[in-house]
Amino acid sequence: MNACLLFPEALAFRYSTVSANTVECGLMGSTPFGTCPLCQRASSKVHRYYQRKVQDLPISGKIVKLYISTRKFFCQQDSYPRKVFAERFGSCLRPWQRRLERSNEQIQAVGLSCGSKPGARICEVIGLPVSASTLL
Ligand SMILES: [Zn+2]
């Protein structure tokens, strides 16, 4: 099976490891450049890398953790105050999000239909652990 098909187009699959309860996947941005959120110019000049740990939907009942190697780019526009920006992954993973958007949609659906504490128990069983206060 082609693992690239499991993830949004903005993310490129690198590796996976499977253990008893979890599947860990390494990913990175699929484009060779980033687009500055202020001046909208593309940049391929990398400042540094950092890792984002993100939750995804479960696979076969196993919790899926994504480790996304994220680049920070230098902005090419000298007159703007922001010199460095982090790459963006579109609507599938907004800045500061700790879960892919598709995981958030499922958690929200469970929360709306079951409430906070029962919903948190259901999410735990299906491999999408979340606290009751998050479901509220
Ligand atoms: Zn810029």
Image (spheres, rainbow, N blue to C red):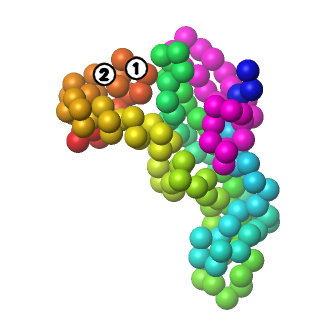
The verdict on label 1 being within 8 Å of ligand 1 is: no
Membership of 38 in magenta stretch: no
The percent coordinates of residue 71 (x first, y second) are 69, 55
Quadrant of residue 33 in the image? bottom right
Looking at the rendered image, the quarter that the C terminus falls into is top left
Quadrant of residue 59 in the image? top right
Query: In the orientation shown, which residue stands out farthest toward the bottom?
Result: 79
Looking at the rendered image, the quarter that the N terminus falls into is top right
Q: Front-most of 105 and 77?
A: 105
Viewed as shown, does residue 80 lie left or right of 123? right
Q: Residue at x 72, y 41 (%)?
A: 12
Q: Which mark is residue 122?
A: 2
Q: Residue at x 68, y 25 (%)?
A: 16
Label 2 close to label 1 by CB (< 8 Å): yes
Specify the segment rendered in magenta: 4-26
Quadrant of residue 77 in the image? bottom right
Above/below status of 20 relative to 37 = above
Query: Callout 2: helix, strand or loop?
Result: helix
The residue type indicated by label 1 comes to: Ile
Q: Which mark is residue 20?
A: none
The percent coordinates of residue 40 (x first, y second) are 65, 74
The percent coordinates of residue 4 (x first, y second) are 71, 33
Q: Front-most of 13 and 1?
A: 1
Q: Residues within 10 Å of mark 1 (few under 14, many from 20)?
A: some
Q: CA distance from mark 2 to mark 1?
A: 6 Å
The residue type indicated by label 2 comes to: Ile
> Would residue 125 be visible to someone looking at this image?
yes
Q: Which residue is mark 1?
A: 126
Query: Callout 1: helix, strand or loop?
Result: loop
Q: Residue at x 47, y 44 (%)?
A: 101
Q: Residue at x 48, y 16 (%)?
A: 61
